[in-house]
Amino acid sequence: MDKVLIKGLRIQTTIGFYQWEKEIKQTLVIDLAMGWNTAAAAENDELAKTLDYAEISTEIEKFANQNPVDLIETLAERLASFLMSQYAIPWLKLTINKPGAVHNTETVGVEIERGQAG
């Protein structure tokens, strides 16, 4: 299966369980692998036949800011569902990291895989 990748997308959004977290923006770092047949786009060099990672990157940040939640687990599920339906993505693996959330760690996060790999 071919994959279109977005790695290390840094977004600022409101996320967190504690009241102080609801009042600030925090950095999330997102990695996304999307199953996609890239041959059709490559055949005639057509952006319209692939996943536009610039557009998707913008949509991820917009989605996170328009749909605030407490848990990165909730954001991961909702974001995966949104991306799969919006872009007809058959399979994806999504990692959301929250750097600095836990003392003495580089990052904490969740990774989910949804859909069927072709």
Image: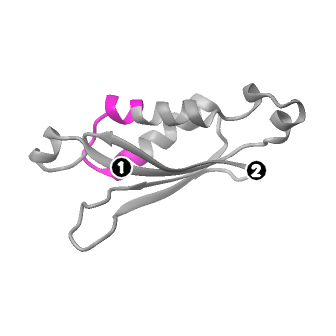
Q: Amino acid at mark 1?
A: Leu
Q: Nearer the viewer, residue 83 or 59?
A: 59
Res. 2 mark = 2
Q: Kindly identify the residue that appears in the image at 85 percent across and 35 percent down.
A: 40
Q: What colour scheme does the image use?
A: one colour
Q: Residue 6: x, y in percent?
A: 57, 47
- For residue 101, what is the image quadrant? bottom left
Q: Residue, x 84% and y 37% (percent of image)?
A: 42
Crowd tier of the residue under label 2, counting other residues whose Cα lies within 10 Å: few below 14, some 14–19, many 20 or above: few
Q: Secondary structure at mark 2?
A: loop
Left or right relative to 48: residue 9: left
Say whether disc 2 or disc 1 marks the residue closer to the N-terminus: 2
Categorize mark 1 by other alpha carbons within 10 Å: few (<14), some (14-19), many (20+).
many
In this picture, which residue range is highlighted in magenta? 62-76
Task: Give the residue at mark 1.
Answer: 28
Q: Amino acid at mark 2?
A: Asp
Q: In the displayed orientation, state which residue is furthest to the top.
A: 48
Q: Say if the magenta span includes residue 15.
A: no
Secondary structure beneath disc 1?
A: strand
Spatial CA span between label 2 and label 1? 26 Å
- Above or below: residue 45 compared with residue 115: above
Count of numbered badges drawn on the protein:
2
